[in-house]
Image (cartoon, rainbow, N blue to C red):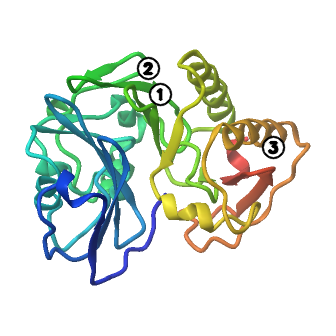
Amino acid sequence: MFIHYLSIKHYQIFCEPRQIKEETTMEGFEVTKIGKHIFCILDAGNSSFYMIEGDEKAAVIDTGITTDKKILPLLRELTDKPLLLVATHAHLDHIYHMDEFEEVYMCHDEKKIDATTLRTLTVGRLKPWDEIHDIHTGSVISLGGTELRICQVPGHTPGSVVILEARENYLFTGDAIGSGCGVWMQIPGSTDLKTYYDSLVHLMHWLVDNGGRMKFFGGHHMQAFESVAHPVYNPLGLGVLADMIDLVAQVLSGEIQGRPSNVSRVFTQEPLLYASYGRAEMQYLLSQK
């Protein structure tokens, strides 16, 4: 989801100091150690990205969007291992710092978005496709001691993926099922709702096949506190995914009728609709049914 970025003036690392290099004076980020080898980084615009340290390499999941500084110096405070980037999808707030990485992975189904729209969505920050390794359901990226397993979830974008870290069982979902206050399906390049429904069902089966007890982390984790359907706190998990499957199915069948949305960024002249079911929420267009 696209979020307007603001300017904040602090930088904090919440973890045991002995497990990272010394803190720096870099401003604009909050870094939380969420696992033994995993960090969550929140930027000034409420975009979350992650670093997973393996025995041989470290992977960064998405990049956030910080226009006035690079993120590589921050990452070097957390690890000295070779870095690679895995992007969950080709939206600006997830790939803005792609050019700071030599080894980059992203699903090439993002090329299904027409070229003009893709340039608009990425404002020139996307590397050439021949410099991006393709990933798809079944792809595995080894970091040494752990691996990243990929599952495609077309919907928010045609090439959206989720990423399962095998050692600590963390699932990084980008914007595929939202981050606690719903998924945006109205953005140009999003799929139709039937495609999204099928991909959600496939994702549920894939998660169960992989154990079904993952810890979920989205692309904007503070949005767990911004839900309309489930106020106060709505963290991601299998329950949200199950409700999202039911929500999309009932919108498609007509059992749920969307109401006019109050989201200001509509990206289109077509009226934007909002629908919810249980803990799931969605912004969409009637033409996507």
Position of residue 172 relative to residue 284, above or below, is above
Q: Residues within 10 Å of mark 1 (few under 14, many from 20)?
A: many
- For disc 1, the marked residue is 152
Q: Mark 2 and mark 1: span between their CA atoms? A: 5 Å
User: Which three-letter amino acid code belongs to the residue tagged 2?
Assistant: Thr
Residue 204 found in image quarter:
top right
The CA span between labels 3 and 1 is 22 Å
- Among the 4 quarters of the image, the one containing residue 15: bottom left
Look at label 1 and name its amino acid.
Gln
| Mark 3 touches mark 2? (CB < 8 Å) | no
* Amino acid carrying mark 3 in the image: Val
28 shown above or below 184: below
Image marks 2 and 1: residues in contact by CB distance under 8 Å = yes
Neighbours of disc 2 within 10 Å: few (<14), some (14-19), many (20+)? some
The residue that disc 3 covers is 251
For label 2, the residue is 137
User: Can you tell which of label 3 and label 1 is closer to the viewer?
Assistant: 1
Query: Where residue 18 sits in the image (x, y, percent)?
Result: 18, 55
Residue drawn at (74%, 60%) of the image:
274
Q: Give the SS element for disc 3.
A: helix
Mark 3 or mark 1, earlier in chain: 1
